[in-house]
Image: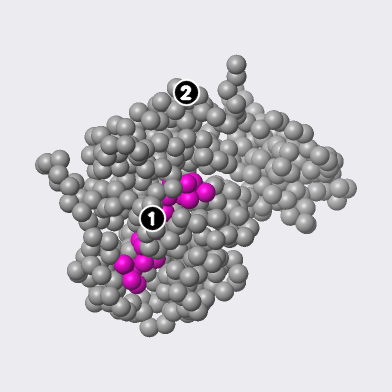
Amino acid sequence: MTTPQEELLPSTRRALLHRIAVAQSEGRAPSLVAAVVRGGRIVWEGSRTSVEGHGPDGDVQYRIGSITKTFTAVLVLRLRDEGLIDLGDPLEKHLAGTGVGEVTVAELLAHSGGLAAESPAPWWERTPGTLRPELADVLGERPAPHPAGRRFHYSNPGYTLLGALVEELRGAPWEEVLRREVLEPLGLNRTGARPEMPHAGGWAVHPWADALLPEAVEDLGRMAPAGQLWSTTRDLARFALFLTNGDDRVLSAGTVREMRAPAAPSEAEDLAVGAGYGLGLQVQHQGGRVLVGHSGSLPGFLANLTIAVADDVAAVALANCTSGPLLASLGADLVRIVAEAEPRIPEPWKPLTDVDPGTLELVGPWYWGTHAFVLRWTADGRLSLGPLARAGRQSRFEPNADGTWTGLEGYYAGERLTPVRRPDGTLSHLDLGSFVFTRQPYDDDAVVPGGVDPEGWRGVG
């Protein structure tokens, strides 16, 4: 008897259950619910609860806190993709009178605009949003303690400004725009600004006693784009698939890939632990694996969404306590358990559908000075450049209509690779951002910058 490839093995399922059971027990969470996504669908769901009887399932709403920011970032990038804004635009160009208008849209998305982490007292997460009816109330008298663009400094008011930008350019409330442009197209019917039954209640757990205190639920008002939303593991699983593959009804695959790329200067401490931030997404390098997603918390609730794109695995975990289980660690562990126990099965190798002699002539070994590289042509129609033996710069290149190629990542991202031919049409060398790649080390038949010693290679007598 064989196990269908889309199903997890019993040992993997038990390992996942054990991990969330430990998190709920040691973290003393009233309830915890989780899901794992692989191959475009939910392959595992589990929950633990302190209440006798049926535990929460993937349809029970929890408040997701700052995962809301990722939804707001999607709305802003839709504006960019439609040509209504540029990420380099200063906020003032589209939203005047904030007092921090020199900060760019990209800096707000990446938390590098220098803005304060929180709004002025009283603490916005535990007080009504009506106390901060205007943007000036959210920003306060000292809205920017750091220079813009110099460092990553997480800012909740920054995402309030992005929500206001969306409202200004769409002419409708943030919540309405979100539902129309993201939630409905993606089928996230159990995600919204206010709880709908069935939903979990939020609790505080006493730090030194196994006692509970109910947490009040506040409407965040202006701060809603930074943390208002409620959702479920099933809805967030669908959202994870969108953040992996894109959906042209909302954002293209290229734009969600842009969201996942680090975009903010990191502190030394963040670099040490492999932490970064993209455009509305946290980026983590952990155990040799790149994880993207977001965590969230509000009084009474914790949330985490973790995606390992290369492994085709994502995890969602939600709990109803103010503090307790470390859901970012839990999400990373759920992904790791599946990725290590049941590694992704590669797609079958397939040859090129059409072989162009001119492109085929480019492949094989090349030398940048004495550094050996190899250029390959892959079935997706791209060129792949990498070091032949040692570690070194590598990148994929996509073709341009004029016969040149553009780098997609790493040192050569955006750089132009140009095949240079002799007057008789034969291939001389490759020019990659002014670097000359030749068929032989310092090939005297090619145009090597600085020339080649006419006496050629020699030994030491």
Left or right of 428? Residue 1 is left
Q: Residue at x 51, y 35 (%)?
A: 43
Characterize the local packing of mark 2: few (<14), some (14-19) or many (20 or more) Cα atoms within 10 angstroms.
few
Question: For the view shown, which residue lies furthest in the right direction?
Answer: 424
Marks 2 and 1 close (CB-CB < 8 Å): no
Mark 2 vs mark 1, foreground winner is 1
On the image, which quarter does residue 22 sit in? top left
Q: Residue at x 69, y 30 (%)?
A: 348
Kindly tell me whether residue 115 is visible in this rendering: no
Q: Quadrant of the N terminus?
A: top right
Q: Quadrant of the C terminus?
A: top right
Amino acid type, label 1: Met
Given residues 126 and 417, the one toward you in this image is 126
Left or right of 261? Residue 456 is right
Q: Which residues are magenta?
A: 219-238
- What x and y, as percent, mark residue 219? 31, 67
Provide the residue designation for mark 1.
Answer: 197
Q: Which of the two labelled residues, at mark 2 and mark 1, occupies the earlier sequence position? A: 2
Q: CA distance from mark 2 to mark 1?
A: 32 Å
Left or right of 117? Residue 183 is right
